[in-house]
Structures are given as C-alpha cells and as structure tokens.
Amino acid sequence: MDSETLSHVAQIISESEYLIALTGAGISKESNVPTFRGEDGMWRNYNAMELATPSAFARNPELVWEWYSWRQGLIAECKPNRAHSTLAKWEERGILNYVITQNVDGLHRRAGSANVLEVHGDLWATKCTECSHHGRLDAPADGVPKCPECGSKLRPDVVWFGESLDRDVMMSVYAELERADVCLVIGTSALVQPAASFPLIVKQCGGKVLEFNVEETPLSRIVDVHLSGRAGETLPRIDSLL
Ligand code: APR
C-alpha cells in the first residue's frame, strides 16, 4: 500500500463532513471469524440453502441450530481486531458517524462502537416462531431453544436468504446513506443485496466511496479509491496519518 494513496485517503477522511462505514465478513477475518465466500469461506463448506433459509429451518430446525450454535461457540472465542477498534476510536473522536454492518458477530459493539446498524441481525438474538417474543442467548444454543412465553421454537434473529430486512433498521440505513459525504466499504464481496447497493446510493447523492479489501470486488469499478490490503493493517495506518 503506497504512502501517497494512504495520505490521499487520510485527507479525504479528515475533510469529510459526514463519514460512515459499510462492513462485511472481511473485517472480522483477522479475528479468526471465517468469511462466507473467501478461500475457507463457510459457503464453500456448507450449503446455505440447508442452513440459512426459512424452509431449511422448517425442514430441520435441529440442524440449523446446530450450525448457529457452532458459530456462536466460535465467535465467543474471537476478539475484535485493530480494524474494529480503529472504527470505534473514530466514532469516539467524532470522525465516524455510523457503522452499517452485514456481520452478525457483534464484534463492532465489542470493540466499543455504539452507532452500529446490523442489517442482517445478531447471532445471539432470538425470536419466537409463533408469538412476538424476542430474546438473547448468553451461551451457544443447546438443541432447539424454546420460547419462555409460549413454548414454541425460537429461531436465530438473523436475516436468512429470501427474507426482507428489518424496516426500522433500513429506514435508519437510508437516512445515513443520504447524509454521508464519504462511505468506507470494508471487507465485503459486494455480492449480496441490498447492502451491495448501499455505496451506489452514496455515490448517487454526490458522496465518495473508499473500498478496503484484499481483492477487487464488483464495486471496485465505481469507488473513488480502492485500498488493497488487510483492513486490520490498512485502517490503523490511516489512523496514524489523521
Ligand atoms: N481485510 C479486508 N477484506 C478482506 C479481508 C481482510 N483481512 N479478508 C477477506 N476480505 C474480503 C474478501 O476479499 C471478500 O471480498 O472480505 C470479503 C468477504 O466477502 P464475503 O465472504 O462474501 O462476506 P460478505 O460480503 O460480508 O457477505 C455478505 O452474505 O452470506 C451472506 O449474510 C451473509 O452478511 C453476509 C452476506
């Protein structure tokens, strides 16, 4: 990563009136959280249609919970990395306004970020399949957890393929996309909608988009700057220039 590009990006960030960040699984890779489509991506080893759809849950809730429990166990052992902590520091310093994340791992909040919009939900949150109960697990699920109110099956409160995103969360997301003059896009393959289109909205509203990724993505054609490298290394280097 050449120092000229780093200084250029640091200047764009320091001159920004309203900075936001969109993050994906790549930002948690250096915390040992597997990505979905990378080299050892989860969707290379597991069938998403058997594990992350409403019909998969209807067919085999034990199998779905077994997989989410495995992910909960894995993530409970993980810690936020320097990319997460740099964004939390920028929020604290008033440089960064919001993190919009596709991740359900909760590592942004554990790093200290408060302004986080989790568009795909939260791995530890649950909701009842029958009544309006919403809850949280504080340990990996053991079997299929039951609703404390009506006794029905609980499901992970995450967004599965084919499901729409939470309306209130999306209202907040679009408000942030419109306000932003600079959007950092960190560690996402930009293949899953609607999140993959969020940076296009920032561009359409006249804002700039800065992409942080170890490889090019479909977004790389439209971004203002593509920073090739691991986010846990690139973000702290930019922070040192602010
Ligand atoms: N730093 C920056 N980028 C990285 C790093 C790193 N250390 N390691 C990997 N990446 C990049 C990869 O090159 C890839 O472009 O992170 C991206 C991860 O892409 P995906 O695995 O597709 O994850 P994501 O884009 O978050 O997936 C979107 O798909 O499966 C669904 O709901 C799931 O939220 C997820 C959504």
Image (cartoon, rainbow, N blue to C red):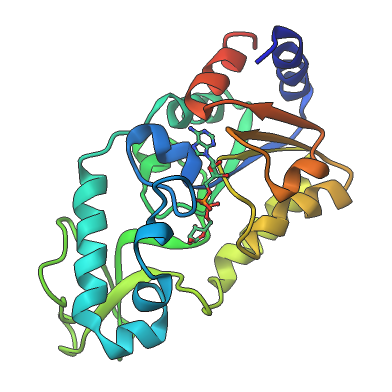
Horizontal and vertical percent position of residue 27: 48, 38
- Residue 217 lies, with reference to residue 59, above or below; the image says above
| Left or right: 217, with 169 as reference point | right
In the rendered image, which quarter contains the N terminus? Answer: top right
Viewer-side residue, 97 vs 232: 232
Viewer-side residue, 214 vs 105: 214
What residue is shown at x 89% (from left), y 44% (from top)? Answer: 206
Question: Among all residues in the image, which is located at the extreme left?
Answer: 142
Viewer-side residue, 40 vs 95: 40
Q: Which quadrant of the figure has residue 20?
A: top right
In the rendered image, which quarter contains the C terminus? Answer: top right
Q: Which quadrant of the figure has residue 45?
A: bottom left
Q: From where the camera sits, is residue 129 visible? A: no
Q: How many marks?
A: 0
Q: Which quadrant of the figure has residue 167?
A: bottom right
- Residue 76 lies, with reference to residue 123, above or below; the image says above
What residue is shown at x 82% (from left), y 33% (from top)? Answer: 224
What residue is shown at x 71% (from left), y 55% (from top)? Answer: 198
What residue is shown at x 37% (from left), y 41% (from top)? Answer: 107
| Left or right: 87, with 207 as reference point | left
Horizontal and vertical percent position of residue 73: 18, 52
Horizontal and vertical percent position of residue 214: 58, 32
